[in-house]
Image (cartoon, rainbow, N blue to C red):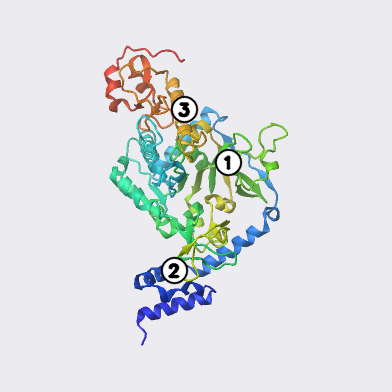
Amino acid sequence: MASKEEEAVDALRARYEAAGQGHVFAHWDKCDEGERDALAAQLRSVDLDHVKKIFDRSIADHDAGAAAKGEIEPVVADASVLKASAEDLSEWREAGLGVASLGELAVVLLAGGQGTRLGSSAPKGMYDIGLPSGRTLFRLQAERLAKLMAMSSEEANQGAPVRVPWYIMTSPHTHAATEKYFHDNEFFGLDSADVTFFQQGSLPCFTPEGKIIMQSKHEMATAPDGNGGIYAALHASGVIDDMAKRGIRHVYAYCVDNALVKVGDPTYVGFCALRNVEAGAKVIAKAYPEEAVGVFTRRNGEVHVVEYSEMPAELASATDAETGKIKFDAANVVLHYYSFDFLKKCCAPDDVVQSSLVYHVAKKKVPRVTEDGAGTETPETPNGVKLEAFIFDVYKYAKDVAFLEGERGADFAPVKNKEGTGKDSPDTARALIDALHREWIMNAEGSVDEDDDDGLGVTHADGKRYVEVAPAASYAGEGLEPVVRSYFMGFVPAGLSIEPVRDNKRAAENATDEDEPPAKK
């Protein structure tokens, strides 16, 4: 008489055979008990009907090609922070701070990537980009979120505490290390009850014919389901339910590898909230036609992002007849806004979004089990299909999308490549932060002291002394006048992290009421 365990395996085998995937049991008899348990657990975790539908519609979409989808048209931003009036900017910012003060704002961070291209196997958020303070990306962003809450409390909530929950999406490769890093650093001063970690999902890898690839005799080959897997992960992890319980109405999402990101950006959130849109995107004008960024477009009235690798060269270099500027220049830099109702719809398994979402097809060399089941081999040519969704794929389902043009030097400092490559790397990000923070100091009627008479400044290995304003001192350049005045004659030293006056002993010692700051240089 078969045991319950054997009956369960028989039922599992029957389910896979009925789906045309019975080969996953090909080497079952060669597996030991532990390997069988691991394989059975992995197989039970897969919704075969769901993944088959994803595979079928994604392959069909891929095979149809771009031409069958219709022509694309450029997206024109509804407004620009570079051109908006001071009154509009103030109104948007006030609305955004108000949203946070009411407890209606949540922030979602995409942090599943490792720093492989940076020369590190650790989560990318743990990378130190070389600022004087040694702040990592995670620390920078945590402190900016804390500053947002402080500003919202002071300016919109009469000093009462403000809570903005932070939901951090990791991957199987980064989850444990990310959680440990936050615990070891006491959540950078944030309330741990407001920081939630959740993992993105994965999908089986398939042959071009739709057969699941076995990586070894007891393990399917799988791959992350892309940053667009965030929607299914928000549902599966219970995060979307937590947002509902908290009364969240507005959600800001971004990617960890942007060293200049304004976490929870009140001006942008307020801009979208006042327009009562389902979705929004803060875009940056492309710097040059070949820049490796996707661009927002419209196709058949729907909003889409066309990746740089998919954009025909003639369209990438096309210019506007009237302005002479790049025609398709609304670069996607992963600064997303959602109304909570729209986000909830995107996450629901039974909604039209999840039931019709098309995944992108990537043909890759996928390691596979050897014919005898004894090992794993990597083919010399692509043998498999990896499916991944992109976070922007849901925009076409939104009834209305608001586009706000941001400022490259204040919103976007990507950290993707190794130090010294000179492009989207720690050194370029440092230079962007340095330039922006120098501008802030000058706008506060200060000057940067390049000398280091007392030897306290940090000189980077590249020989430069960078200016860094701590997030606690200023979120976006505001409120720096007292900090600048606290330095002798308004000379703010390079090579140091400029902290709030209360935290800056050296500056406080130099502060005098009579000091007059020097004129701008």
Classify 10 Å Cα crowding around label 1: few (below 14), some (14-19), many (20 and above): few
Q: Residue at x 53, y 33 (%)?
A: 408
Measured as percent of width and height from the top left, residue 166 is found at 39, 46
**From mark 1 to mark 2, how far is it between C-alphas?**
42 Å
Which sits in the foreground, 270 or 424? 424
Q: Position of residue 65 (x, y in %)?
A: 67, 55
Number of numbered discs present? 3
The amino acid sitting under disc 3 is Leu
Alpha-carbon span between mark 2 and mark 3? 57 Å
Residue 316 found in image quarter: top right
Q: Is there any visible trace of residue 274 in the rendered image?
A: yes
Say what amino acid the circle numbered 1 marks.
Ala
Location of residue 54 (image quadrant): bottom right
**Residue 184, above or below 211:** above
Q: From the viewer's perspective, is 333 left or right of 472?
A: right
The amino acid type found where label 2 is placed reads Ala
Dot 1 lies on which element?
loop
Disc 2: which residue:
374
Compare marks 3 and 1 and give the one earlier in the sequence: 1
**Which mark is on residue 436?**
3
User: Does residue 382 lie above or below 409 as drawn?
Assistant: below
Q: Earlier in the sequence, mark 1 or mark 2?
A: 1
Residue located at (60% from left, 36% from top): 286
Q: Nearer the viewer, residue 413 or 460?
A: 460
Drawn side of residue 458 relative to residue 283, left or right:
left
Horizontally, residue 42 falls left or right of residue 390, namely left
- Between the residue at mark 3 and the residue at mark 1, the CA separation in whole angstroms equals 23 Å
Label number found at residue 292? 1
Q: Nearer the viewer, residue 157 or 488?
A: 488
Question: Quick one: SS at disc 3?
Answer: helix
Report crowding for label 2: few under 14, some 14 to 19, many 20 or more residues within 10 A (C-alpha). Answer: few
